[in-house]
Amino acid sequence: MSKSLDNVILAKHFAQKYGANVLRYLILNSHYNQVINLSEELIQQAVDYIQKIKSLLKKMNFYLYIEKIKITSTRETPERGEEIINSLLNNLNTVK
């Protein structure tokens, strides 16, 4: 994509058109310091994957309801957050 070719899409416009979860998936599925080269095929794969996740969550919620299982949430400690930031600053300890 190139701004001069007028084929750039803003994140907010992409999210409005395809959904925020599709945008999140594409971002999380790419390297954090690389440009995301979008194609219709890549977008459709993301849409399909998000639908699979939603379907799985519905099935899990139904199972939890039937089995009367309650889930409590936990919060990460601040130390864990610092560890994540340090890993990102170290490029996730990967070969450059």
Image (cartoon, rainbow, N blue to C red):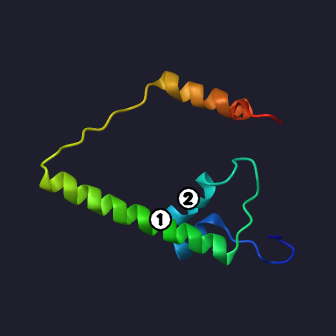
Name the residue located 47 percent from the left edge and 65 percent from the top edge. Answer: 50
Q: Position of residue 25 (x, y in %)?
A: 55, 58
Amino acid on which disc 2 is placed: Tyr
Q: Position of residue 46 (x, y in %)?
A: 56, 67
The answer to whether the residues at label 1 and label 2 have Cβ atoms under 8 Å apart is: yes
Residue 48 in view here: yes
User: Distance of mark 1 from mark 2, alpha carbons?
Assistant: 8 Å
Mark 2 residue element: helix
Name the residue located 25 percent from the left edge and 38 percent from the top edge. Answer: 72
In front of the other: 54 or 27:
54
Mark 1 residue element: helix
Q: Which mark is residue 50?
A: 1
Residue 34 sits above or below residue 1 on the image? above
Residue 61 sits above or below residue 78 on the image? below
Q: Name the quadrant of the C terminus.
A: top right
N-term mark: 1 or 2: 2
